[in-house]
Structure formats: structure tokens, C-alpha cells
Amino acid sequence: MGERKRVQMTFHELPMKVAINSWRLVMDTADTIFSGLTQEQLLREAAPGKNGVIYLLGHLTAVHDRMFSILGLGPRLHPDLDALFIDNPDKAAAEILSARQLKQYWDEVNETVLSRFQNLSADEWLLQHRAMSEEDYAKDPIPNRLAVLLSRTNHLSDHLGQLAFALK
Amino acid sequence: MGERKRVQMTFHELPMKVAINSWRLVMDTADTIFSGLTQEQLLREAAPGKNGVIYLLGHLTAVHDRMFSILGLGPRLHPDLDALFIDNPDKAAAEILSARQLKQYWDEVNETVLSRFQNLSADEWLLQHRAMSEEDYAKDPIPNRLAVLLSRTNHLSDHLGQLAFALK
């Protein structure tokens, strides 16, 4: 009975441990890429005729920073990034912040958000996120907090594929 | 009590529903991209000086086909694809199969694997996959079947980012 209970406890928390580990694995790859970039690579285009690699670093930092709000993990660290890197996909925006500054934000946001993931219980991860009403959740609980985490993991993976192409 | 039980039941199955939905969302994007490709686009390079878009279609079909084995969902549909699209990352390999044939395999593999996902219970998704020993699982249950699904979703997202760049 004790044994059985332990296994059920594990099963209850396991899905979130797997999902957070999946995020961590993709983040490890992202960190490796971003920490090794030269100045020349940071200024390359990340899509033909479009935003540069440095813009992508800002964009991902802003999107990850928004997770604090939507997941209810506390106040955002750098809400000002949205205007530059989400609302306004423009080449020039990235020039306002240096690569050095952006990398510092990147590290800070990602370290903090990962540590806050642990503050949510397995059940809380399955509840509605902050941009979702109780009514919407009652109709369809699938786009919940966990769905946000998986969506952000996919978003990061997608941009890493784009980046790998741009850096070759 | 009845209400409480229903909610707990839902919570038990919800993580897998979210994970399978995440896969489905990325697959929808992939289907939209692959179904709209022109012959010229299929022959483009998907990475500078490397494999073409058609090769990527074969590679993703092979990787998804391997999920039948590793997740224990029944026999694979196209094991022959591995030699061409996984073991041998070579431009010429893709020319052996036509784009038409590959797209047929792509549809067949992805439709079947998605329908088989439903055959696994929430608990089975949290158990070890077929390439993992019970001993390994006892030490660390995180790289389980669910982890394989999330990893394949990230892999697909990554290649879609690469593809979006190649097709622009």
C-alpha cells in the first residue's frame, strides 16, 4: 500500500517534471547557441531580408518574460521588451539595446522563470492560465498552463531551427 | 464526492491530452507547409549546401514512423525510410523516392500514429518506452513515453523553423 501510494504520487507529478525537463533541454541548446555567437553572427539576418539574430534574442527574451504574467509566476522582469521585440518586428529596434545587455536579460529571465516553474503544483499547472476565463476553462481545459509551457517550448524550438540555418 | 472524482479523473488524463494537442498543433502547421509546396520548393536546399526540402519531408516521416516502435504502438509502416533519411543524410537519397510517394507516406504515418496515441492510457504514457530498461526507468522515470512525444514535437518544430527560412 505504501509502495502503491508512492508510485501514484510520482505519477501525479511526473507529467510536469517531463514537460519542464523538455523545456530545459531546448533551453540548454538555446543557451549554447546564444553564448557562442560572435558580433558578426549577432548582426546576421535570421530570415532573408528580415530581423537579425540579435532581434531574435530580444524576441525570445520578451516572449519568455511574458510567461511570468500568463502563468501567474509573479511580476515580469522586463515588460519594456514587448514594444521593441513583439509589437514592432523591425530591424532597427534591436539597435536600441546592446547584445551584451540583451544577453544579460536573457540569462536573468530564463533562470528566474525556470526556478518559478517549481512554485506551481502539479494541479496548478493543469488549471487555467491568467489570460483564460473560468468559463473558457470549463468548456475546454486543454489550453491550460501546461499548454502554454509546451507552446513556448515549441516556439523556442522553431526559432532555434531558423537560427541554425541563419548561422550556417 | 462525485464531482470531485470527475475532476480528479480529468486531471489524471489532462496532461496527455494537452501534450497530444501540442503535437497536433505543430503537425497542422507542418501539413499546411508540406501540402502547399511547389516542385521548385521541394528541390530547394533546407540548409545551405545541405539536404533539400524533400529530404526533410523524408526525414520527418522516418522519425515519426519510428515512434510506432519506441512507444509500442504496433509495427512500423515504413522502416525502409531509415536507411535513406536517418542513417544516411545525403542529398542523393531523396531522389530515390518521388515527392508524391513521400507525401503519401507522410500522411499515412502521421494519421496512423496520431490515432494510435489514443490507445495508450494516461498511465502507460508515463511508463518507460521500448528503448529503455526497467532499471533505467527506476533510476529516472523522466525520459519516458511522454518525454519521447515532447521531444519529437520539439524536433518537428525545429525543422519547421528551418523550413520557414528555406522557403522564404
Image (tube, coloured by chain):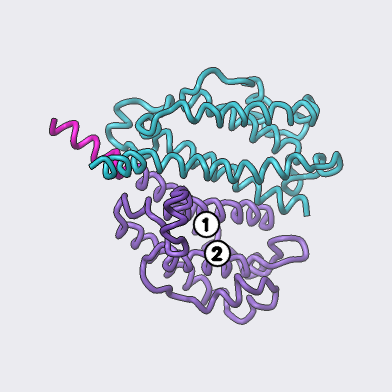
Chain colours: A purple, B cyan
Taken as a whole, is the magenta stretch helix, strand or loop? helix
The chain letter under disc 2 is: A
Magenta region, residue range? A1-14
**Label 1 crowd (10 A; few <14 / some 14-19 / many >=20):** some
Q: Could you tell me which quadrant the N terminus of chain A lies in?
A: top left
The residue lying at 54 percent from left, 51 percent from top is A154
Q: Position of residue B80 (x, y in %)?
A: 65, 20
Which tag is nearer the camera, tag 2 or tag 1?
2
Q: Are marks 2 and 1 on the same chain?
A: yes
Residue A10 sits inside the magenta stretch: yes
Q: Please say whether residue B80 is visible from this viewpoint.
A: yes
Q: Residue furthest right?
A: B40
Residue B51 sits inside the magenta stretch: no
**Label 2 crowd (10 A; few <14 / some 14-19 / many >=20):** many
Query: How many dots with numbers?
Result: 2
Which label number is shown at residue A11?
A: none
Q: Position of residue A29 (x, y in %)?
A: 51, 53
Is A77 above or below relative to B13?
Answer: below
* Residue position for label 1: A30
Secondary element at tag 2: helix
Q: Could you tell me which quadrant the C terminus of chain A lies in?
A: bottom right
Q: Position of residue B43 (x, y in %)?
A: 82, 40
Q: Please say whether residue A24 is visible from this viewpoint.
A: no
The chain letter under disc 1 is: A
Which label number is shown at residue A60?
A: 2
Secondary element at tag 1: helix
The residue lying at 53 percent from left, 65 percent from top is A63
Is B152 above or below relative to A58?
Answer: above
The residue lying at 49 percent from left, 64 percent from top is A64
**Amino acid tagged 2:** Leu
Tag 2 near tag 1, CB within 8 Å? yes
